[in-house]
Image (cartoon, helix red, strand yellow):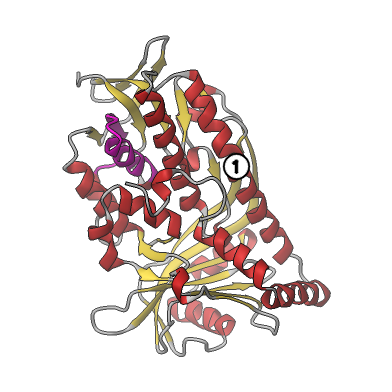
Amino acid sequence: MSQRRDLVILGGGLVGMTLALAAARQGITSHVVDKARPEDLTAEGIDGRASAISTASWNLFCNIGLEERLAPLGCPIEAIAVTDQMRPGRIDFRPQPHEGTLGRMYANRDIRLALFEAAAAEPAIHWASGVEPVSRERGEHGVRVMLSDGRAVEGSLLVGAEGRQSPTRVEAGLNSARWDYSHRAMVTAITHEQPHQGVAWEIFFPAGPLALLPLLDLPDGRHRSAVVWTFAEKDAAGVIAMPDAVFLGEMAARMQGIFGAIELAAPRMSYPLNFHHAARIVEHRLALVGDAAHGMHPIAGQGLNLGLRDVGALAQVLAEGMRLGLDPGDAQLLARYERWRSVDSLTVMAATDALVRLFGIPGRLPSLVRRLGMGAVQRSGWLKKFFMEEARGMSGALPDLLRSEAA
């Protein structure tokens, strides 16, 4: 049996491992348990997904010591173009030079490699990979998790970070509001003739949006973007079965030549889209973070960033409480974490869900109304600034680790 630590984090993905590192920077120790092995999660081609990392999330990565590892690998998002089927009336979000970028695009694999490398060098983190929990006990004085290899890990607080299907959440009876969008996302990457100039495109269609997200050029100079193309589930079998040439042709027709000629640069992966939001994210000696607490449509690219805000809030609440001599599983601390995260997470998720439904209404009249509204936003300086601050994750009561001046 390994020694007792402050946290037992179930799930060593992007959110779970970031929490372990953020906690370690505050002097909080943890066990991290994940059924996958690091070498499997970071193998070439295992995950072609990319994530938009907001300004606030980038501050978090810098404040937990990942800046040097990650800085050369991210592509700055200089602007965001939002359009309804490439028709007139688009919105262009472009911050002033002194405001910095709107975020950075990273391959998920690069973030994982940086997290795992940092965690391997951190004595406050004990890592159990390639094993699964077979039982979870939350008692009056601590938590204990039995693992599939016969070992047990113990701590003061159990953290569920296993993703949308979190067995820890289900076992604790923390019910979620959930629904299926009847949409599927196809994820891949393309190379293209014209440079993207750091612009992220969100092209809305009634069947679902097509997002084109800037990535760094390849070593041979080819320009590259990540793609998230959403389509109706009823069309899924047909889209998945398309030969690459047909798939590229369909995508090129929707892009209307903005990048010139395009070619596939990564395998195509697809997954169904749904919504879930747990009304309660804490229980006796238990806290949920990331997709275990809330999962949303990728339309605004905020899913991972929302989970990283959970990380910053939980790490701060625990650190402040422990400095006062409180146990990490103290009910007062968990209640504070839940209050802090409830409004922000619900607001972001409701706004994302509203966007999905608004742009999913077919017909010329709804399109006209949407474009008139987008034109009004384009002309309004304060509205554009508000939306840009939301995209950068810099609005509201931010945890210290998500502020650039954090130590």
Give yes or no for residue 284 being in the magenta stretch: no
Residue 189 placement (x, y as % from top left): 40, 72
* Residue placed most toward the observer, 35 or 390: 390
Give yes or no for residue 16 being in the magenta stretch: yes
325 left or right, relative to 330: left
Is 374 placed above or below 20 here? below
Q: Can see residue 393?
A: yes
The residue indicated by pointer 1 is 276
Residue occupying the point 22% across, 33% down: 124
Residue 382 placement (x, y as % from top left): 66, 68
The kind of secondary structure element at disc 1 is strand
Magenta segment range? 15-37
262 left or right, relative to 211: left
Residue 150 placement (x, y as % from top left): 24, 20
120 left or right, relative to 338: left
Q: Can see residue 163?
A: no
Residue occupying the point 43% across, 82% down: 197
Residue occupying the point 42% across, 49% down: 402
Q: How many marks?
A: 1
The N terminus - image quarter: top left
* Residue placed most toward the observer, 202 or 261: 202
Q: Quadrant of residue 297?
A: bottom right
* Residue most extreme to the right: 365
Residue type highlighted by circle 1: His
Q: Label 1: how many residues lie within 10 Å, few (<14), some (14-19) or many (20+)?
A: many
Q: Quadrant of residue 142?
A: top left
Is 103 placed above or below 374 here? above
61 left or right, relative to 51: left
Residue occupying the point 39% across, 23% down: 328
Residue 10 placement (x, y as % from top left): 36, 32
